[in-house]
Structure formats: C-alpha cells, structure tokens
C-alpha cells in the first residue's frame, strides 16, 4: 500500500510507515534530512500526488501564514528590515496558504490527514477533527497540533508524560530539551524548521494506528 507523506523533509512519519511495511515516500521541495533519500520525492507535492495511485496521504503544509501566533503582522505597518511580510502582502500570502491547504484536502487521494497548529483553517474551512499533544505520545512537551481527517479515525493517546510547567504555571515546550535529549527550539537559524518536525511518538502512533486502519479498510473493499 502506497502512502505519501507530503511537505515532510524530516522523514519521521515516512520512516514510521516504512517500519510497518508500507511503501511510504516523503515529499518536499527541500532535500530530506531523515537519511533515506531513496524514499524521498524532492518535488512539488502536487507533482508527487500525480506520480502514483496513492492509497493514503498525510500532509504537513507550512504553517507560517496559517497560524494565529503572528496575527500582529497582518495590520498595516511599515515594511520590516528582517524581510517579514506585513499588511497586505502578508494577507495575500495567507490567502495563498489557505488555497494550498484546501487543494491538498480536495486532491484525488481517498484517505487524507492534514496537520497544522492552531490557526485560521478552523474558521476558513472547519474545526479540526482532533487536537493532539506530544505529551500524550511519549514526549514531555506541550504543542497543540490540529488534525483534519478524511477517511481516518482519531488517534488514540499512547504514553502520557507530565509536560513541563513554567514558573507562571503555563505549559512550556520552548527552549528546552525533550525527554530524549533533543533540543526543542534552539536559538539558531533553523529554529522554525526544528520546531515543525513531527515528534517520533506521534509518527509512530500514526503509522501503527492509521496504518492498521488503512490496511483493514482496503482489504475489506
């Protein structure tokens, strides 16, 4: 069974499905960092969609213009020296991101999941089917992650870890290390890229739970 993991350069989800015996491929415009280039399609995701008859796809579209955490930049204001889009330019970029999201959801793959943080798609499209947290999948960090599903069940929690708490009593997941020792959000240029990577516990749950479901569903048809 062929599974496309779109907009994924880390290959975390791809490798989890491969471990389950699926013919899974990651896809991204960037080179993969997961160590298995033979399983990576470095191309536009819609080009990849047209390559094969995929049984299912999991997409991780860029959240830069979909998240609500940077809403202050959508107000009219002087251009930023840092290159951050503001005002009308940022609004145009958001519209393009919304269209990209919807094109993924409406593509001709029968079984689909789309992952993104809390953002505008809850109002521009519909509320997510599920909001998950890494601390319910074996990681002691907090990061709300939304899932929009088509033909897939909700993920069941696998292993709970008490998330770290700040002195203000808020769940904290930034500028610390995960329980496996990996830095969560180091202050380096690749910070955003590292923050966006899917945690191994979530990837494993997707492959085990959704993989089994896809297999049963296709065998019954």
Image: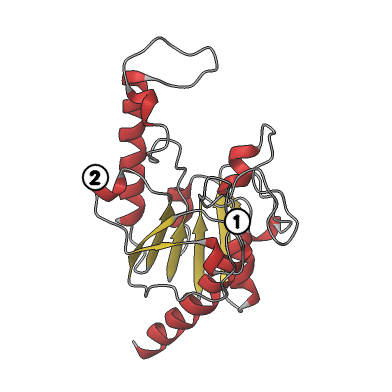
Q: Residues within 10 Å of mark 2 (few under 14, many from 20)?
A: few
Residue 148 got which mark? none
Identify the residue at horizontal 57%, vertical 71% (top origin): 23
Q: Is residue 187 left or right of residue 96?
A: right
Residue 164 got which mark? 1
Q: Position of residue 83 (x, y in %)?
A: 52, 18
- 1 or 2: tag closer to the N-terminus: 2
Secondary element type, mark 2: helix
Identify the residue at horizontal 45%, vertical 54% (top origin): 144
Q: How is the image coloured?
A: secondary structure
Q: Position of residue 120 (x, y in %)?
A: 31, 43
Q: Is residue 62 above or below residue 84?
A: below
Residue 19 lies in what quarter of the image? bottom right
Number of on-image labels: 2
Q: Is residue 121 above or below residue 81?
A: below
What is the distance, in whole Å, between disc 1 and disc 2 at their CAs?
32 Å
Residue extending farthest bottom: 220
Q: Position of residue 180 (x, y in %)?
A: 73, 61
Q: Which residue is mark 2?
A: 124
Identify the residue at horizontal 47%, vertical 43% (top origin): 62
Q: Is residue 60 above or below residue 186?
A: below
Kindly tell me whether residue 41 is visible in this rendering: yes
Secondary element type, mark 1: loop
Q: Please tell me whether mark 1 or mark 2 is closer to you in this view.
A: 1
Q: Residues within 10 Å of mark 1 (few under 14, many from 20)?
A: some
Kindly tell me whether residue 54 is visible in this rendering: no
Residue 208 lies in what quarter of the image? bottom right
Relative depth, front residue between 56 and 78: 78
Q: Position of residue 13 (x, y in %)?
A: 58, 63
Relative depth, front residue between 105 and 173: 173
Residue extending farthest top: 78
């Amino acid at each position: 069974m062929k599974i496309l993991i779109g907009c994924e350069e880390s290959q975390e989800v791809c490798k989890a499905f491969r471990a389950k015996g699926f013919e899974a491929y990651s896809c991204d415009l960037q080179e993969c960092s997961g160590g298995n280039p033979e399983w990576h399609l470095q191309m536009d995701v819609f080009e990849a969609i047209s390559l094969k008859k995929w049984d299912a796809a999991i997409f991780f579209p860029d959240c830069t213009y979909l998240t609500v955490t940077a809403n202050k930049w959508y107000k009219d204001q002087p251009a930023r020296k840092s290159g951050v889009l503001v005002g009308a330019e940022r609004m145009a970029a958001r519209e393009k991101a919304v269209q990209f999201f919807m094109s993924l959801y409406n593509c001709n793959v029968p079984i689909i999941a789309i992952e993104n943080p809390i953002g505008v798609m809850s109002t521009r499209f519909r509320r997510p089917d599920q909001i998950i947290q890494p601390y319910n999948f074996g990681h002691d960090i907090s990061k709300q992650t939304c899932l929009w599903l088509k033909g897939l069940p909700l993920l069941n929690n696998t292993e709970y870890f008490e998330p770290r708490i700040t002195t203000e009593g808020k769940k904290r997941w930034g500028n610390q290390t995960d329980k496996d020792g990996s830095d969560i959000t180091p202050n380096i240029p690749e910070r955003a890229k590292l923050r966006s990577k899917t945690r191994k516990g979530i990837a494993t749950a997707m492959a085990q739970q959704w993989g089994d479901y896809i297999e049963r569903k296709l065998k019954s048809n």
